[in-house]
Image (cartoon, coloured by chain):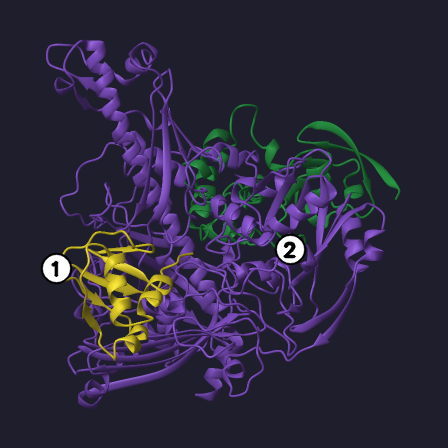
Chain colours: A yellow, B purple, C green
């Protein structure tokens, strides 16, 4: 199952767990499963974070495909000047 | 100087042609936003709050509306109230105050009249009754228990919230066991730092001309870092459908992040709608300083553990960014960006605090310079304490590909070590420090971003090409687009006309920010050219009477065995008979922006009588991935560096106790001038970004990250005093020398 | 409001226009004569983007009242090229990438021309002080100074 790496701010939903596993073929599906298990986390990940997948950071990652061995890193939204 | 991973040889990429828009810009023909006038146009002026925080009890515009030449007056009542959860709520409130003014300079009414003088006279006749509210100016005041609210609509981001607060954001990042690492460390250095508000300081004040026609559609001419952004935000603030607005990008006279948002356009649009006339709105320099930008002020506390042989084993840091009156600032990202070192144990906390000061805006590598100043100063102190070379200690701990970023995601291929080695081996670093001077080193990086871009490439009948994008050209990006297209198509770079098109003439394109134009928009141009080459091969196969598979594209010609090569111009001449015009559009949402690292070195003297710092020599080393147009890459490094030198030595907002900015002019807010500086030497390192067809990383942001620590570290070595407060202006240096 | 009739020479052409007493020369050039090359970056004489030559002297046109232009010869950035041939400063600025956004460029070119007209062989320090009244936020001045140095070399070569 894809491994999801959470920012410290989101670990309050998982009882402090920094890395959780969740099934799904897309980042959106993974988020949906996390919301089932950890109510509130899905919304926080959808609206307050970007996702780093395979070395690339996406601000709207919902439909990105992931494999069972993918690491998904949720990070603070990036901006620039 | 280059470091390459088997880089191919290019014909055009890496050369230095004269930029395509250069002629207009050296002859005064280039049209910036304030250079446009429309027939029948009115001129607008703002009424701005003289108070740092106040409730607006009443606004009486009747007298103003009756004054000579006045055609329209607007206040907050002329704009819809967005829901506080709307992502554009803060922009909306900053464009025009509703009910409460949040800082001195906050716009609360505007007038359009036949002349600027008439508009200004009418503004002065608007009567406002205020109820003064407490003014919060500092981080400490903002975060104090029971502090009055800066902005009653602010809800803290990223954490659970129990109602309005002065806390804008709060983030924590942790890995390893920081406490255990400090307990076991040979050496721990802890310091506190602070930095002042600084402005982006673009020389062109914000300006626009807006014409709302009788059909309700708005034509906007404005300079910005992204005209699709102007369209979207203006529509949102007005409560309009996006399609009612067309934005034509004027040439932009500098942005540096400060023009990634809007201030004027909805106001001019509403005035135009009410008056039925085009409206021109141009800010004064005083307004630019009082009511746009700035970059956040900050405080920080840094604690780093090291072993006696220079391994950095833990970092615990806290950053407080003072973000102004609204909350759309992501401070953590910049704070994270300083994690340039391996640090097995890390704790990083960043907050944003609201104050009754102008809404802060992005400025080159937003929030990273404040953090890098602090961290790179402490690392320098560790190197001094351990008697290590400041490059050696960084080489010992520098992140490489696969090492985790602060957020845990592994770094892709990066060039930090290559930059450190390039400086170590440079003429500057190998030269002895001049007598009476001292030398400092600093480093930093920025993630860079990708996001959405579109490009259309049209081949013309004569074999030339028009490359159309939606990325405003702030510092030579037209030339970069043309170089990449020339490389792909195999035609002369001057046979390509790069165009920045309006919102109805090119596909959606995100703001030019985060060093993304050459990376993302460039990639869209490359993709369009590659699709076009496929089409050219097919047309050539038709003309030559051979199978498509028999045609290859080599250096601008279709090549097939046994026949003369067919140049691009021969194919475009037969476009009609082979299927019609040759045009391709490509668009993308790019991931994979490559972090760009930099290392800076500076020699300076400190006059212990006056506190004056004189920079004698400066070298900026930075990884560009691939420098498409090396002159403009060097220019980005030099410009970012000098902005950083200004931040380090001179620039700061000075407020009185009521929150009024006391130095709102270029005389008193002093940015560096030519006589302050030496040449800024550059060393462009090229470790190609594997996620871009030419290896581009983006170079615009990083240059401003290292200078503050670089200068501070040199001052420390000149005076034996560790300066921890920016700017390191003569009075502060004298005070520190006196205390010592 | 009364308006004064002003007659002067701009970029070699005789011109006349009306201006009220409080109008700056910068506004008159831009609004009355359509010469928008000179820019307003501050309106207080601090940034130099509005630099023009008045009878050969460097001025911030935002600090000059339009009526003061009566009878003078004014040169703006639009007037420094020789017909179709760019002034050597314009050419070296292009070749040396001495501009990024380009908003300060008209003023910098005029200030550099004023310098080279008076001092054909300036040192780097003299160039830096001559341009100290012209703010540029993009370039860090390095490529500007080098391009002025190169133009000085070319102008000396042409004069020889």
Label 1 sits on a secondary structure element that is loop
Indicate left or right for B477 with C110 as reference: left
Locate residue B41, reporting x and y percent: 71, 38
Q: Chain of mark 2?
A: B
The residue sitting at 25% across, 83% down in the picture is B385
Q: Could you say which quadrant of the image residue B722 lies in?
A: bottom left
Locate residue B710, reporting x and y percent: 35, 68
As drawn, which residue projects farthest toward the left? B561
> Is there one chain holding both mark 2 and mark 1?
no
Q: Quadrant of the C terminus of chain B?
A: bottom left
Whole-angstrom CA distance, mark 2 to mark 1, is 50 Å
Report the number of numbered marks: 2
Tell which of B182 and B623 is nearer to you: B182
Locate residue B266, reporting x and y percent: 61, 50
As drawn, which residue projects farthest toward the right? C2
Marking on residue B183? none
State whether residue C93 appears in this view.
Answer: yes
Indicate left or right for A16 with B248 as reference: left
Q: Which residue is mark 1?
A: A69
As drawn, which residue projects farthest toward the bottom? B183
Q: Chain of mark 1?
A: A
Q: Could you say which quadrant of the image residue B321 lies in?
A: bottom left
Indicate left or right for B670 with B159 as reference: right
Compared to residue C87, the image places residue B350 above or below, namely below
Q: Which residue is mark 2?
A: B79
Tell which of B121 and B92 is nearer to you: B92
Label 2 sits on a secondary structure element that is loop
């Amino acid at each position: 199952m894809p491994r999801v790496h959470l920012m410290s701010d989101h670990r309050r939903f998982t009882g402090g767990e920094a890395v959780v596993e969740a099934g799904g073929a897309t980042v959106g599906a993974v988020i949906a499963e996390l919301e089932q298990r950890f109510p509130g986390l899905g919304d926080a990940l959808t609206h307050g974070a970007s996702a780093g997948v395979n070395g690339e950071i996406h601000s709207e990652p919902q439909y990105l495909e992931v494999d069972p061995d993918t690491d998904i890193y949720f990070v603070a939204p990036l901006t620039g000047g | 100087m280059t470091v390459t991973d088997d880089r191919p040889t290019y014909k055009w990429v890496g050369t230095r042609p004269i930029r395509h828009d250069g002629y207009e810009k050296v002859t005064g023909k280039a049209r910036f936003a304030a250079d446009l006038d429309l027939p029948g146009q009115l001129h607008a002026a703002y009424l701005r709050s003289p108070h740092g925080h106040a409730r607006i009890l009443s606004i009486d515009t009747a007298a103003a509306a009756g004054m000579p030449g006045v055609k329209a007056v607007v206040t907050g009542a002329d704009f819809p109230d967005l829901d506080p959860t709307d992502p554009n709520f803060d922009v909306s409130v900053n464009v025009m105050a509703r009910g409460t003014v949040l800082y001195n300079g906050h716009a609360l009414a505007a007038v359009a009249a036949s002349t600027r003088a008439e508009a200004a006279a009418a503004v002065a006749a608007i009567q406002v009754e205020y109820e003064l509210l407490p003014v919060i100016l500092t981080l400490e005041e903002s975060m104090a228990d029971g502090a009055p609210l800066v902005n009653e609509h602010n809800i803290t981001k990223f954490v659970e919230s129990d109602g309005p607060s002065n806390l804008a954001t709060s983030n924590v990042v942790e890995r390893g066991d920081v406490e255990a690492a400090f307990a076991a460390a040979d050496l721990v250095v802890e310091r506190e730092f602070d930095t002042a508000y600084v402005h982006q300081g673009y020389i062109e004040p914000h300006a626009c001309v807006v014409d709302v026609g009788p059909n309700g559609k708005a034509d906007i001419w404005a300079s910005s870092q992204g005209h699709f952004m102007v369209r979207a935000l203006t529509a949102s603030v007005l409560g309009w459908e996006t399609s009612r607005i067309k934005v034509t990008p004027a040439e932009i006279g500098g942005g540096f992040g400060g023009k990634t948002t809007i201030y004027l356009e909805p106001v001019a649009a509403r005035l135009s709608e009410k008056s039925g006339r085009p409206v021109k709105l141009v800010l004064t320099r005083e307004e630019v300083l009082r009511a746009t930008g700035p970059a956040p002020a900050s405080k920080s506390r840094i604690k780093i553990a090291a072993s006696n042989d220079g391994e950095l084993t833990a970092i615990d840091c806290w950053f407080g960014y003072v973000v102004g009156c609204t909350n759309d600032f992501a401070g953590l990202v910049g704070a994270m960006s300083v994690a340039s070192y391996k640090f097995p144990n890390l704790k990083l906390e960043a907050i944003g605090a609201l104050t009754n000061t102008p809404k802060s805006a992005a400025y080159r590598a937003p929030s990273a310079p404040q953090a890098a100043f602090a961290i790179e100063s402490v690392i320098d102190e560790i190197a001094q304490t351990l008697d290590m070379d400041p490059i050696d200690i960084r080489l010992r701990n520098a992140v490489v590909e696969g090492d985790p970023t602060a957020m845990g995601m592994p770094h892709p291929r990066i060039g930090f070590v290559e930059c450190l080695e390039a400086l170590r081996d440079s003429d500057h670093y190998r030269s002895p420090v001049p007598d009476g001077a001292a030398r400092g080193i600093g480093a930093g990086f920025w993630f860079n971003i990708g996001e959405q871009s579109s490009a259309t490439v049209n081949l013309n009948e004569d074999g030339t090409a028009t490359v159309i994008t939606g990325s405003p050209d702030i510092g030579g990006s037209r030339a970069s687009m043309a170089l990449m297209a020339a490389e792909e198509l195999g035609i002369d770079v001057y046979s390509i006309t790069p165009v920045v098109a309006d919102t109805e003439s090119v596909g959606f394109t995100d703001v030019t920010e985060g060093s993304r134009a050459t990376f993302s928009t460039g990639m869209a141009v490359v993709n369009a050219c590659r699709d076009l080459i496929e089409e050219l091969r097919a047309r050539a196969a038709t003309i030559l009477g051979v199978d498509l598979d028999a045609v290859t594209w080599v250096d601008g010609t279709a090549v097939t065995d046994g026949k003369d090569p067919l140049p691009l111009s021969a194919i475009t001449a037969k476009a009609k008979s082979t299927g019609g015009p040759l045009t391709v559009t490509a668009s993308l949402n790019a991931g994979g922006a490559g972090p760009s690292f930099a290392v800076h070195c500076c020699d300076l003297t400190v006059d212990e009588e006056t506190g004056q710092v004189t920079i004698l020599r400066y070298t900026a080393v930075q990884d560009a991935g691939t420098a498409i147009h090396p002159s403009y890459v060097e220019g980005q490094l030099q410009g970012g560096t000098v902005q950083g030198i200004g931040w380090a030595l001179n620039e700061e907002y000075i407020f009185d106790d009521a929150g009024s900015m006391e130095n709102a002019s270029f005389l008193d807010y002093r940015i560096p001038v030519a006589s302050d500086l030496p040449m800024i030497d550059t060393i462009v390192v090229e470790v190609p970004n594997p996620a871009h067809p030419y290896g581009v990383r983006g170079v615009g942001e990083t240059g401003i990250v290292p200078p503050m620590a670089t200068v501070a570290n040199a001052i420390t070595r000149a005076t034996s005093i560790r300066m921890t407060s920016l700017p390191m202006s003569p009075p502060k240096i004298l005070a520190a020398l006196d205390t010592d | 409001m009364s308006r004064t009739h002003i007659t002067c020479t701009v970029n070699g052409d005789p011109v006349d226009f009306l201006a009220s007493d409080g109008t700056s020369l910068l506004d008159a050039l831009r609004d009355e004569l359509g010469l928008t090359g000179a820019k307003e970056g501050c309106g207080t004489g601090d940034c130099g983007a509005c630099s023009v030559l008045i009878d050969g002297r460097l001025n911030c046109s935002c600090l000059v009242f339009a009526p003061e232009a009566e009878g003078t010869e004014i040169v703006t950035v639009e007037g420094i090229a020789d017909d179709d041939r760019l002034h050597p400063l314009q050419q070296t600025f292009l070749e040396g990438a001495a501009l990024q956004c380009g908003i300060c460029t008209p003023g910098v070119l005029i200030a550099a021309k004023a310098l080279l007209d008076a001092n054909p062989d300036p040192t780097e320090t003299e160039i830096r002080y001559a341009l100290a009244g012209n703010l540029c936020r993009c370039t860090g001045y390095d490529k500007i100074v080098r391009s002025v140095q190169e133009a000085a070399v070319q102008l000396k070569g042409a004069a020889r």
